[in-house]
Amino acid sequence: MIELRQLCKTFVLGDQPVKALDTIDLSIGVGEYISVMGPSGSGKSTLLNMIGLLDRPDSGSYTFENAETTTMSEPQRAELRSQRMGFVFQAYHLIPRLTARENIELPMVLGRVSSAERQRRSQEVMERLGIADRSHHLPKQLSGGQRQRVALARAIICKPALLLADEPTGNLDSHSGAEVVALLEELNRDGITLLVVTHDADLGARARRQLKMLDGRIDRDLTPG
Amino acid sequence: MNLLDKLLFCWRSVSRTRLRSMMLLLAMAIGVCSVVMLTSLGEGARNYVMQEFAFLGKDVLVMFPGRNETTGGLPPVTGAAARNITLTETLRLQRAVPAILKVAPVIIGSTLVSHGERGREVIVLGTTGAFPDIRQMSLDQGRNLHLDPGHKDNECLVGSTLLQELLPNQPAIGQLLRVADYRCRVVGVLSGRGDAFGMDLSDSVLVSISLAQQLFNTDSLFRVLLQVNTQQPLAATKKRIEEEMARLHQNELDVTIVSPDAMLATFDQILTIMTLAVGGIGAISLLVAGVLVMNLTIINTSQRTPEIGLLKALGAAEQTVLQLILWEAALLALAGALTGLLASALLLTLASVLWPSFPMQPPLWAVVAATATAVLAALLFAWVPARRASRLSPIHALYRR
C-alpha cells in the first residue's frame, strides 16, 4: 500500500539544518497496525505528515496505492487526502464555531456529497462512536474524549483506507484515552490501515508493528508475537 | 464544495463569531453611512442655495431700466441715466407680446406706516395682485391685491412681522393703516418670509401700484416681473420683449432683462466645486473603511490559519479556501453597506424632521458608489491575505510553523 524509498527531509532551525527524515525506506501493507515512537525531534511527526501527503520530501520516492505521489500536483494530493486518508490530531483541530455534526460533515461538504447522504452517513458514524446525542453541541461544550471522537468520526466519514493518528490520546485522561484507542483498534480490525504516532509506550506497545525512530532514521522495526 | 455549501459555511462563520462580524460590519456601515451623509449634506447645501435663489421661477423674467454697459466720454447732457419704464408701457408690452402671461410692475420705497399710536418705517412695495401670484406667495388671511393696475382703491397686504408690530392680537382685515399721508385698507396678510430681491417681505407692506405712484410721486417703475409662456423658447421671448421695449423707447434699447438661468449660472461654479469637495471627503471616508476591512480580514485570516490548514488537510483545494474567505468578506461588506444605508436613511429622516428647511437628500450616485466601493474594497483588501492563506502548505497552517 505504501512504499517509501530513500526519503529525505531537512528543516532549517535557526541557521542549523536538521535532518528530520534521513533516507527512510519503509513498506506498509493494507490493514497493518503500526505505532511510531521516539523522542521529540526524532522525525516521527514529519514521517506522519509525509505519509499523509501534508508535506513534500526533499528527495526520494513515495508511492501510495501504486501511484507516485512526489510528482503529483497539489490538487491531486488534496484529492487523495480527502478520499483515501483520515487524520486524527492531538489537538483535535475541530472548527470551534461548527457543531459536532457540522465538523463531521465537513469533509463530505468539501467532497460535494449530497446533503441527504451527508445526514445519513454522519448519523451512522456518530451512533457507532457513541456521540449521536452530542451532534448539535459546539466543540467547547464537549469533553476531551468526546472531541477526539468527533475528530475520529470526521476522519473516517469518507471511508479512508489509511488512518493517521498523531498523539491521539495526548490531551486525554487515561479513561477517555483508552476509549479512543479501543475505537481506533476496532476500525483497524474492520480493515483500515492504522498508523499511530505516540510518546506513550503503553499505547505504542499495543500495535502489531512498532517503529522506533531516532535522529530521522528508523532505529528499530519490531513485529512482536 | 458547491455554492450553497460555501455560503452556508460563510454564514456560520459570520453568525457564530459575532464580535468580529460586528466590528467588520460597523466599520463598513460607518464608511458607507459617512459617505451618504456627507454627500447628503453637500446636496442639501446645494439644494438650499438653489431654493433660496429660485425665488424667481424658471418662467419669470425681470426687467429694469438702464443697460449694463460700460460707456465712455462725457456724461449725457440730460443727466438722466436712462429712460424710465412706465406703467403704460408695461400694458402696451403685454398686449404686443402674447408670450407674456402676467406682468407685475414694482415700485419700491420706504416710508412710515402707522396704526393708531404705533408707527414703523418699513419698505413699501407698490404692485398689483400679479406680484404675489408670480412669486407664488401665499396669504394667511384675506385676499390678494387687485390684478388691474388701473384700480384706484388704496389697499394693501401686510407682512406677518409688521402685522404683529402694528396690530397685535386683533383682526387685521378691513383695518385702515396710515401710509405716509394716505389711508390704506388691509385686505390680506402675507404668510412666512417671502424673500424678494434678497429682502425680507415679512416686515413690509405691499400696496396698490396707484397708491405707490402717489406716495413716491413717480411714474417710473423700479422692476417689472414678467411671467412668460415657457412653451416658447425663453431666449426668443426675451428678444421679442427687448424689441418691443426698444420700439416704445424710440428705437433705443435701454432696459435690461435678466433671466433666472443667468442668475443661477453664477452659483453653478461654486456649487460644482462644493460637490467635488464633498465627494472627496466621501472618498476619504470610504478609503478609511476599506483599510479597516483590510486590517480585520488580515487579523481574521491569520487567527484562522490552523483552520485553513485543516480544510486543506481534509482535501479543500486552494481555490475553495480562497473563495470561502472572499465570499465571507463580500457578504460582510454587503451587510455592512446595507446597515450603513439604513442608518443614513434614519439619520436623514431625523434631520428632515429637525431642520425641514434644509433639504438633505443623498444623490443616487453616492449611494451606488458607496455600496459598490465598500464591497470592492472588502474584496480587494481580502484578496491579499486570502491568497496568502490559501497557498499555505497544510502542515505549516496546521502547526503554525
Image (tube, rainbow, N blue to C red):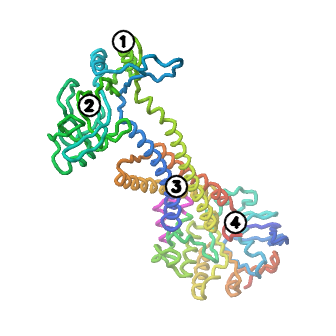
Work out whether residue B97 or residue B384 is closer to the camera in this orientation and state it.
B97
Evaluate whether residue A102 shows in this view: yes
Helix, strand or loop for disc 4: loop
Residue at 34% across, 24% down: B230
Subunit of label 4: A
State which chain disc 2 sits on: B
How far apart marks 1 and 3 lie (CA) works out to 63 Å
The residue that mark 3 highlights is B31
* Distance between the alpha carbons at the discs numbered 4 and 2: 103 Å
Report the span colored magenta.
Answer: A108-124
Of the pair A129 and B401, the residue shown nearer to us:
B401
Which is closer to the viewer, label 2 or label 1?
2
**Nearest-to-viewer mark from 4 and 2:** 2
Left or right for A7, reference B191:
right
Looking at the rendered structure, the kind of residue marked 1 is Arg
Q: Secondary structure at mark 3?
A: helix
Q: Earlier in the sequence, mark 2 or mark 1?
A: 2
Q: Position of residue B136 (x, y in %)?
A: 28, 35
Mark whose residue sits in front, 1 or 4: 1
Residue A208: % across, % down: 70, 81
Give the quadrant of residue B290: bottom right
Q: Which residue position holds label 1?
A: B247
Q: Amino acid at mark 4?
A: Leu
For label 4, the residue is A54
Chain at tag 1? B
Residue at horizontal 48 percent and vertical 45 percent from the top:
B366
Q: Is residue A167 magenta?
A: no
Mark found first going from the N terminus, 3 or 2? 3
The residue tagged 2 is B215
